[in-house]
Amino acid sequence: MLSGRIAGEMPPDRAIELSSRLSDTFLADTCLELDPERAKPIIAGFPVARSVAITRLLLARGEYITMGRFVDVLPDETLFAATDAIDSGADLLKISFFVEDSQRLDAVIAHLDTERRRAVIDAAAAEDLWPEVIATLRRIGPEARHALAELALAQRAEILDSLIRAAAEHDLWPSLLTIGRELPDASVERLADQPAFDDARVVRSVIDSVVANDLWDALQTQLPLMGPTRCARLLEVAATERRAFLAEFGQRVTAEDSCADTLRAGSAHLAAPVRAEAAAASGRTTLAGLIAEPAAS
């Protein structure tokens, strides 16, 4: 602890000269107690090769918090060299969670090629790290967010299935619906087309999140991208298990809303008894009329 504090107070040239006589292991230990912001002048002049060696030691110890703190102050050359030394997409994700400066995350994402970005997404699916991915997406700039999100939504069905089920388990819908409003329609449509949205547990999680987090506007905006079949499943689950949702939704939907045609088309896919239940749960509202008089009638 004392060595970290002393290093932070030393003149940069002296600290760098002294470090050349110390082992990588000792310097890695020092990093645990060093205030990166106060040591920024030292870090700026620290040899890149030594930084990479220390990165590997910290990584082997699982010191993700410490590594995240240093991302904020590393010069670009050092940051990118250290990033290249980290093979695991999961490790990159775990470190990113502790980075405070979102602009440094933007720089790292811009540095990663498509293959490495895809490795991050694969790691999210394999190790249930979607909450870390979504938290990172919310923090970074629009360009980096769109690039990573669009790549994620272009992956194979198993990856998208894991994302949907993680969203249901961890209530990631507020973030996903917000991010979805920024993405091309085709990306959102591909996600909505996944079979996981047939699962009543997933649909219930969407409904419950909309109610709990006041996501009505986001739902109405993106409902047309879900298409009639998915809309029908939403109405079916709501009619049988979440009638209060339809009562509230009915107070918000108007005939001029962009989702009106989708709701009408979706109701045509419902069995007559379910359609009647959904219309009744919606009360005397425009929504009830859209459901009761589907597009196919």
Image (cartoon, rainbow, N blue to C red):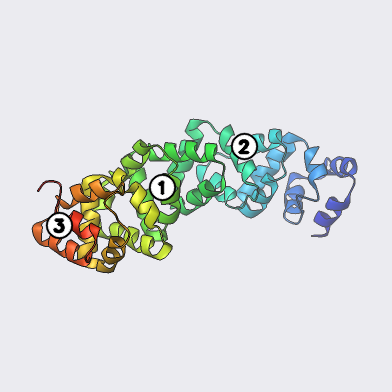
Compared across the picture, whether 69 is left or right of 198 comes to: right
Is 284 rendered above or below residue 114? below
Q: Residue 125 carries which label?
A: 1
Q: Distance between the residues labelled 3 and 2?
A: 52 Å
Q: Mark 2 points at which residue?
A: 107
Q: N-terminal of the two: label 3 or label 1?
A: 1
Compared across the picture, whether 288 is left or right of 87 comes to: left
Point out the frontmost of discs 1 and 2: 2
Which is nearer the eye, 69 or 272?
A: 272
Q: Name the residue under label 3.
A: 292
Q: How crowded is mark 2: few (under 14 residues within 10 Å), some or many (20 or more)?
A: some
Point out the frontmost of discs 3 and 1: 3
Horizontal and vertical percent position of residue 209? 38, 61
Q: Which residue is drawn at 26% across and 49% down?
A: 260
Horizontal and vertical percent position of residue 6? 86, 54
- The answer to the question of whether label 1 and label 2 lie on touching residues, with beta carbons closer than 8 A, is no
Q: Using the rendered image of the protein, determine whether residue 15 is visible from the camera's viewpoint.
A: yes
